[in-house]
Amino acid sequence: MSIAAPARIRLGVAQAQRLAVGALRGIGYAEPQARILADHMIDAALCGYEYSGLPKILQIADSPKRRQPVVPMREIRATPVSALIDGGNHSGMLAMDHATDVAIAKAREHGFALVGVTNSWMSGRSAYYVERIARADLVGMHTVGSASLVAPPGAAGPAYGTNPIAFGFPSDGDPLVIDVSTAAFPGTELDFHNMLGLPLPAGVALDPAGHPTTDPAAARQGALLPFGGHKGFAIGLAMQALGVLAGSGMNAAKDYGYLVIAMRPDLLLPLEDFKRDLADMLARVKAAPRQPGTAEIRLPGERARRARELARQQGIEIDLRVHDRLAQLAVRDPG
């Protein structure tokens, strides 16, 4: 017997924005905060990352951290080129939005900026921040040290986070944006699969007993694996160490620490020279001889950028179950 595919619904961008803001207002966010969060998640959806799009609102709604007290963000310490920010238990998408603004402002004025964020959680898609930095004609880097979900090689349970790393580089035309998880499967996508009961690919997760599994619920209780074995583990551990630098040890759970770096290219090269030479280098990469059956050498970020332009015209698709849950939350919207 065949199993029917899950029902889906297509939303225009403005329609998706209204649904997202309404649902976020329904779970208690003020209008300005709801719009910052919605803008982030709508952009992820446009870029084809459904699991980082509207379903993330449901993850925020269900997060135990959201039920803990929230206080205003503040700078714990700062210099002309650095800041350590207490995120006040705000969503990481709000805290990192602020941290990115701080990094851009400091780097524009002083050439370089190093900004850490502690006491925050669930920062969303790292590419979102480094693309903003790159579009400000700065080189950007963002690292995440997060809650334990990944097992080191040989371990049967989690010991460190999925820990993505992202880079943004200004170039002639669109910036070069690179965003990769150091786990074999993104943590947010694991939650999305668990929400909808979708199986995982083989070889990316362990169950609570340390055995391989494709069951997302078992993996959520067990662990994900690092990408690339020992090499991925080493890079993920470096991201966790940078999270410590960003103040993760100051959190009660000693888990999340976000670091953002921004720098002016003209510390080393005139900006226009850098952008031109980077564009030339990327053109050489795309012009590499192709293997049979390969239509194009695609750079990091190109697929997402094309998807964004298409989705702006055609709208985005989401699972109908997700849509209905968001609509129920939006009914509570006090605004």
Image (cartoon, rainbow, N blue to C red):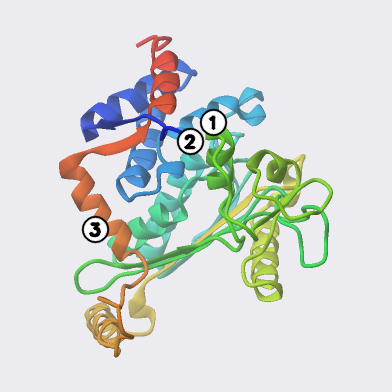
Note whether residue 317 is visible. Answer: yes
Please tell me how crowded label 1 is: few (under 14), some (14-19), or many (20+) other residues with Cα within 10 Å. Answer: some
Circle 3 — which element? helix
Residue 85 percent across, percent down from the top left: 58, 47
Cα–Cα gap, marks 3 and 2: 22 Å
At a point 40% along the width and 59% down the height, the residue shown is 130
- Kindly identify which residue carries mark 3: 306
Q: Amino acid at mark 2?
A: Lys
Q: Could you tell me if the residues under marks 1 and 2 are in contact, i.e. CB atoms within 8 Å?
A: yes
Q: Amino acid at mark 1?
A: Ile
Residue 223 percent across, percent down from the top left: 73, 51
Q: Residue furthest bottom?
A: 289
Cα–Cα gap, marks 1 and 2: 6 Å
Circle 1 — which element? helix
Q: Amino acid at mark 3?
A: Arg
At a point 82% along the width and 66% down the height, the residue shown is 154
- Kindly identify which residue carries mark 2: 56
At a point 38% along the width and 25% down the height, the residue shown is 323
Q: Is residue 226 left or right of residue 169?
A: right
Indicate which disc, 3 or 1, sits on the residue closer to the N terminus.
1
Residue 315 percent across, percent down from the top left: 22, 38
Please tell me how crowded label 2 is: few (under 14), some (14-19), or many (20+) other residues with Cα within 10 Å. Answer: many
The one of 102 and 45 positioned closer to us in this rendering? 45
- Foreground disc of the pair 3, 1: 3
Circle 2 — which element? helix
At a point 24% along the width and 83% down the height, the residue shown is 283
- Quadrant for residue 228, please give it: bottom right
- Kindly identify which residue carries mark 1: 60
Note whether residue 81 is visible. Answer: no
